[in-house]
Amino acid sequence: QSVLTQPPSASGTPGQRVTISCSGSSSNIGSNTVNWYQQLPGTAPKLLIHSNDQRPSGVPDRFSGSKSGTSDSLAISGLQSEDEADYYCAAWDDSLNGWVFGGGTKLTVL
Amino acid sequence: EVQLVESGGDLVQPGGSLRLSCAASEFTFNNYNMNWVRQAPGKGLEWVSYISASSSTIYYADSVKGRFTISRDNAQNSLYLQINSLRAEDTAVYYCARVLGNILTGNNWFDPWGQGTLVTVSS
């Protein structure tokens, strides 16, 4: 049981916009910033969004993050086949003195 | 290119020990905090342990506290994870990751990640 809650799966067709939610509590998302990681099949995780809504260099602007209270969401617009991957949210947790992850969302491009 | 390369994963019997290493290159290792994160087969990511740049601050997940020890050698640009009293549930790919941002403000993130090293605990 993950501390942060994500839907286990999401899907969309090429060109569509999909969103993935991440729900936490006051000790993690409510008081710290949220990051998103993309894990392509058979590879290591890669930073996708940091500080709630910041894209590292090289990440397309089709990816965006937004936070509200104790929840966050990742939006992917103009869905492409290469976006098919697992997506994880993460944040520092003040109560646990460590980082917590969501359980991951498997995105399928139909 | 900033790179992290893990090694040391192996097949180990329950109760056994292992030392994982993470070699860093192309950045000033002694300026950065570091983490270990693991992923059990077919499962999600789980943070394991954190060490500050000077080794003055160390944190562990409750699931590994007392059995795992994180350390680093800044002269060798290397991060380590000593894992003892291994259990079947410790079977996972172990990733090292550099910590960016400010841990004191809660605004921090992991980038990059290494390719991981597989630890399998089985008799």
Image (cartoon, helix red, strand yellow):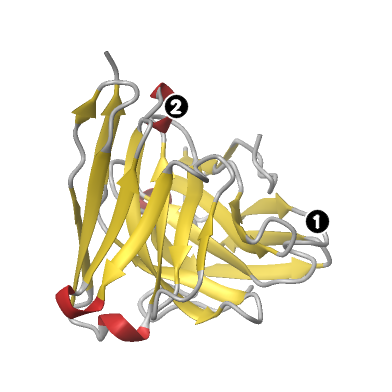
Q: Which residue is mark 1?
A: A25
Horizontal and vertical percent for residue B89?
44, 27
Picture disc at residue B84: none
**Marks 1/2: CA distance?**
27 Å
Image mark 1: chain:
A
Circle 1: element type: loop
The one nearer the camera, A35 or A82, is A35
Examine the rendering and report whether any part of residue A50 can be seen. Answer: no
Image mark 2: chain:
B
| B48 sits left or right of A1 in the view | left
* Amino acid type, label 2: Glu
Q: Label 2: few (<14), some or many (≥20) within 10 Å?
A: few
Which part of the image, by quadrant, shows the N terminus of chain B?
A: bottom left
In this rendering, is residue B120 above or below A19?
above
In this rendering, is residue B121 above or below A38?
above
Horizontal and vertical percent for residue B32?
37, 80
Picture disc at residue B89: 2
Circle 2: element type: helix
The residue that appears at 29% across and 68% down in the rendered structure is: B72
The image quadrant of residue A74 is: bottom right
